Image (spheres, rainbow, N blue to C red):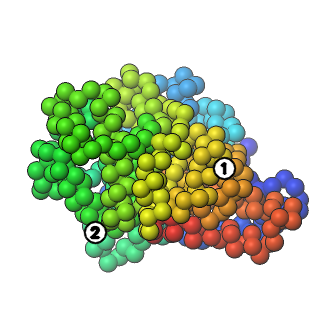
Amino acid sequence: MPSSLHPDRLLPVDAQARAVARRLYEAVRDLPILSPHGHVDPRLLVDDKPFSDPASLLISSDHYVTRLLHACGVPLDELGVGQGPLSEQQARQVWRTMCEHWTAFRGTPVRYWMEAELVEIFGATERPAAATADRIYDRIAARLADPAFHPRALFRRFGIEVLATTDDPADDLAAHRALAADPDWTARVLPTFRPDRYLEPGQGWGTAVTRLGEAADIDTSDYDGYIRALENRRRHFIAHGATSADHSHPDVGTEPLTHGEAARIYRAALRGTASEAEGVAFRRHMLLEMARMSCDDGLVMTLHPSVRRNHHAPTHDRFGPDTGHDIPLRAEFTDALRPLLQRYGTAEGFHLILFTLDEAVFTREIAPLAGFYPSVYAGAPWWFLDAPDAIRRFRRAVTETAGFSRTSGFVDDTRAFCSIPARHDMSRRLDCGYLAELVAEHRLDEDEAMETAVDLVTVNPRKAFKL
């Protein structure tokens, strides 16, 4: 059977609400994409080389796809994970494997995104299956050879106005500099300051801190030099267009240390003698320091905590990080963030965007925090929660307490370049559906719903992320 994309997909079932949702969606469908948090490598756009093959582009590099296939018994090495360039034979076999397991994606957002990519980008309308795999592969491979399907051409076709990357503080940001200097490039590709590895003492930390100091040209052999180096690299990122700093730790504790205690633990961590408890205390203190720096330099602070990274050690040892086995933990924000918010929650210009993988936190903690503190925004559902039903639950959970204006706008958080338009389209449809239900219930007038739908796409991300 052919794959068809129904024009009313994800819109309300109720006829009255669906009619309103259609009108709202028409107003936002073609608005430019603002992507303030993601993981696309900016060198993709600098080099503008043709994508190598359909499997590497759409399967091997997308842990959303590979993790579910792995759960169905397909080894990651049979999906090209961690293998670098694939031969044509290997790529075709990876593609066949995905198509043979297409039923595993039924009801998942991965299927929604993948169908949109296949049909809307590549014009591949056959449903993936063992019998259709080679024909679909050949069609996509032929398209990838066309300059109209090179990275820059697709970027423009997708309507992306702003794309934020995620970058190591010691990165020289040469790719961002090259794009900014290119007269043929007009979109904004912004770096994002991601200092996690420099805030968490542990194995290899001393080497990382030394590298940080070298990048900043500052001696990091003591705590004060370390702080100056972090501040220096933040300024470097701001000079290259950065508007936010991104943080992901096991928790968001922000208990302060005295300067003397922080310096003592820092020295011990450099020697490799700091205890695990001291390392945690230092990281929590440094998260508070990151907030202090954001108040000073204006970078938005985003937090997405409570993930057990690399849950399956053998997979990490063989294939590396970001290969599909990061698993959510329970989260707590109210008490953990109180030291930070006591100091900076009402500071002028400070923006703190809170993301979570623990849905209970939306209602219990994030919405109430965003509904009081002028600095706090409720981050959109991401990662395991950027799915239709979870996004609907988010709107219901947060709107009652914090309204629409205290939310961040959608973030796609993706490494899969071609999934960006599909993910944003999904969010726009779902938000329009929710707003249409409010209109149908006579809780909102349609002109207000229309204004809100546009704001969620354009105003909210610009405001929250200072775009």
Identify which residue is drawn at 34% across, 57% down: 292
Is residue 389 found left or right of 315 in the rendered image? right
Most foreground residue, 398 or 394:
398
Q: What kind of element bears circle 1? A: helix
* Residue 394: mark in rendering: 1
Mark 1, residues whose alpha carbon is within 10 Å: few (<14), some, or many (≥20)? many
Most foreground residue, 65 or 424:
424
Identify which residue is drawn at 57% across, 53% down: 369
- Location of residue 229 with respect to 107 vertically, above or below: below
Identify which residue is drawn at 80% across, 61% down: 438
Q: Label 2 is placed on what type of residue?
A: Ala
Is residue 296 found left or right of 187 in the rendered image? left
Q: Residue furthest right?
A: 15
- Location of residue 393 with respect to 123 vertically, above or below: above
Q: Is residue 445 in sight in this rendering?
A: yes
Most foreground residue, 363 or 416:
363
Which numbered disc, 1 or 2, marks the residue that appears first in the sequence?
Answer: 2
| Screen quadrant of the C terminus | bottom left
| Percent coordinates x, y for residue 281 in the rendering | 33, 36
Instruction: Tell me the distance, in whole angstroms, between the alpha carbons under discs 1 and 2.
Output: 35 Å
Identify which residue is drawn at 62% across, 52% down: 368
Find disc 2 in the rendering and name its residue: 239
| Percent coordinates x, y for residue 29 in the rendering | 65, 67
